[in-house]
Amino acid sequence: MKKPELILPGGDLERVKIAFQYGADAVYVGLNEYSLRKAEVRFELSEVKEAIDHAHSLNKRLFVTFNIFAHNEHLKRLESDMKKVASFYPDAFIIADPGIVALAQKIAPNIPIHLSTQANTLNIESVKFWKKQGIKRIVLARELTLDEIKNIHTAVPEMELEIFVHGAMCISYSGRCLLSRYMTGREANLGDCAQPCRWNYRVYSSSDREKSSDVNSSHIRSHNNFFLEERMRPGELYPIEENENGTSVMGSKDLRLIRYLPEILEAGVTGLKIEGRNKSEYYLASTASTYRRALDLLKSSRYTEKDKKILEAELEKLNFRDYTTGFLFDDAKLGEVTENRRYKKTWEYIGIFTDNKNEILVKNKIMTDDKVEVLSPHNIYQDIIIDIYDLTNNKMEEINPGAKEQKAIIKLSKNYPVNSILRKKL
């Protein structure tokens, strides 16, 4: 078994540093023009270089995504920017589009290419094909079962395999969604998804035509079927169609595979990837440290049922839409859709330490006598807010985020490292 690599998302330079601080072996980033998280990615070329240099200073790795499905109009600028990024010596490009693969091999033949999950690699012959094209690692499609992954590894053992183990799931096949463009004009495959799968809908059938005056009844009457109506688009009905395999639904639960890391590694997976370039510092700190603890326990040949429950409980302190194992055990049909679009939330992220004297950036309301937990890079501590001061040393009973970059100094039982996370139970 090759040494597993824990790979975290980096939406900006600060979050890249936090991911490494909390245990990531590698981080993936992208320029917003060529990333499938366009709205949330905030990287300039100079910051990509700084992120790569920072990773290498830690003897860790930095991957750069060029995983859009490009139109002709994108190619000239993409080629120019890829040349610049290549000069910074990233550890890999993550690419889905075969044309961009060809460009990368022409521009930077010495930089490994990891095939994005968007390329929808599902079988042994596809893996063999991509191996012949010079691909170093494949991020497998999320629709694969554990047995299928194992069979791929057995058939092509020299190919590095990576899968997503945690984070939000796109309801469309391997994330290839057309819904956003159809409803809003925003192209998901160019990184601009409006996430309509998370919106609020009503379901109508042909028998409902008399129930609502704002629905186009003649349209319903002409189809003996079911329809969705989005809350902000009254009267616009989208037919729900079914074939011999059933119908599609929206709004997936979030993926969590921490319990099954031993089986995943035994199946031949090298890269363990966490989703979330638009997620908070708290999400990065919690997921990175929790999966790092799991891998460290496995390395020491200790990963008990008690350990699994403790680590799963830590991941339930994040905001999440219920958890699922996805397709790993071929039981997705048992129910992978959330009951509503609301997150489950039992803990609140209230601050992050910006220096080692307990100055914090305020994220949510903090009050004197609040019982809190401090998530640090190496441990979790129980504490209590003794006093709160603003930056001019005025004592306060409480403080709210208020203006942008609201900071405060809090007195606790001890001082904590920079980038430690402050949270409280709701």
Image (tube, rainbow, N blue to C red):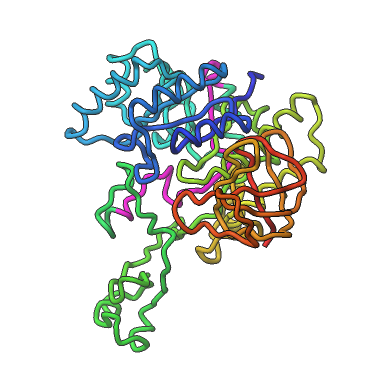
Residue 114: % across, % down: 44, 24
- The image quadrant that residue 311 belongs to is top right
194 versus 31 height, above or below: below
Q: Residue at x 39, y 26 (%)?
A: 48
Of residues 108 and 414, the one nearer the viewer is 414
Q: Is residue 279 left or right of residue 232?
A: right
Is 387 on the left or on the right of 143, as rendered?
A: right
Residue 128 lies, with reference to residue 366, above or below; the image says: above
Q: Is residue 348 left or right of residue 237?
A: right
**Which quadrant: the C terminus?**
bottom right
Could one spot residue 227 in this view of the protein? no
Give x and y (percent) for residue 304.
82, 37
Which residue is nearer to you in this view: 229 or 66? 66
Query: Where is residue 81 drawn, in percent x and y?
Result: 27, 24
Residue at x 66%, y 49% (from the top left corner): 410
Q: Give the quarter of the image for residue 72.
A: top left
Which of the 4 quarters of the picture holds residue 134? top left
- Where are the magenta residues, as a range? 155-180
In the picture, measured across the screen, residue 210 lies left or right of residue 77, that is: right
266, above or below 164, in the image: above
User: In the rendered structure, does residue 163 fall within the stretch colored magenta?
Assistant: yes
- Residue at screen point 31% across, 75% down: 234
- Above or below 246: residue 100: above
